[in-house]
């Protein structure tokens, strides 16, 4: 059986209720990979039959993405994303405060379920420091074959 390499993606996301997405792009001088407005959410979420928790309610989303790449070290892809955001940390913190945004990094992992071929999911101190400085969350979406 031939094993294929793991694939890893990283997404940086800013989300909030009252946001001018163009303002985020303009101030960061970055064209987002994807944006989403409350109107882009499914009808069942926009007009639910019952009250939804805040985390499930429609919101504005600004995303910067590094697509899936063959890689076995999460930190390598994460460092590429941090490099893209380098020098913009203060602007991100200002935007978070001004628009009441939450920030997060989402690590996507596609891998075969085999101990010998799983990617290394390790975040060194330098990455953790950037994440903490931005007040961001880190999530992992793992898809195992």
Image: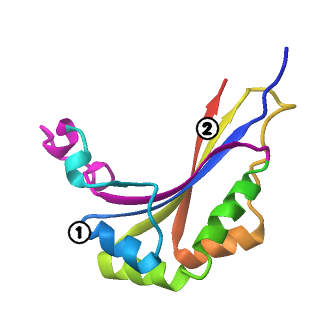
Left or right of 20? Residue 111 is right
Where in the figure is residue 122, as x and y percent of width and height? 76, 55
Q: Earlier in the sequence, mark 1 or mark 2?
A: 1
Q: Secondary structure at mark 2?
A: strand
Count all numbered tags in the image, as a single digit: 2
Task: Look at the image and give the residue range highlighted in magenta.
Answer: 43-72
- The quarter of the image holding the N terminus is top right
Residue 68 image position (x, y, % from top left): 63, 43
**Labelled disc at residue 65:** none
Other-residue count near label 1 (Cα within 10 Å), few / some / many at <14 / 14–19 / ≥20? some
| Residue 36 among magenta residues | no
Quarter of the image for residue 42 reads: top left
Q: Is residue 122 left or right of residue 38?
A: right
Q: Quadrant of residue 43?
A: top left
Q: On residue 18, which mark appears? A: 1
Q: Which quadrant, please, contains the C terminus?
A: top right
In the rendered view, would you say 79 is above or below 126? above
Q: Is residue 47 above or below residue 25?
A: above
Q: Residue furthest top?
A: 1
Q: At which x and y percent is residue 2?
A: 84, 19
Q: Dot 1 lies on which element? A: loop
Instruction: Decide if residue 7 is on the left or right side of residue 64.
Output: right
Q: Residue at x 74, y 60 (%)?
A: 123
Q: Position of residue 105 (x, y in %)?
A: 55, 59
The residue sitting at 33% across, 53% down in the picture is: 55
| Gap in angstroms between the C-alphas marked 1 and 2 | 31 Å
Nearer the observer, 142 or 70 = 70
Q: Nearer the viewer, mark 1 or mark 2?
A: 1
Q: Is residue 17 above or below residue 94?
A: above
Q: Residue at the location (82% across, 24% down)?
A: 3
In the rendered structure, find residue 142 and report the number of the disc placed on it: 2
Residue drawn 54% across and 80% down? Answer: 88
């Amino acid at each position: 059986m031939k094993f294929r390499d793991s694939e890893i993606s990283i997404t940086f996301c800013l989300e909030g209720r009252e946001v001018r997405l163009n303002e985020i792009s303009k101030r960061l001088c970055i064209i987002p990979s994807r944006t989403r407005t409350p109107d882009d959410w499914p009808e069942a979420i926009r007009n639910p039959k019952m009250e939804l928790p805040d985390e499930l309610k429609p919101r504005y989303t600004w995303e910067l993405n590094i697509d899936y790449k063959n890689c076995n070290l999460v930190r390598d892809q994460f460092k590429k994303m941090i490099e893209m955001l380098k020098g913009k940390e203060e602007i991100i913190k200002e935007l978070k405060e001004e628009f009441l945004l939450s920030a997060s990094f989402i690590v996507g992992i596609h891998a075969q379920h085999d101990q010998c071929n799983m990617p290394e999911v390790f975040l060194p101190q330098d990455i953790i420091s950037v994440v903490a400085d931005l007040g961001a969350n880190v999530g992992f979406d793992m898809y195992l074959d």
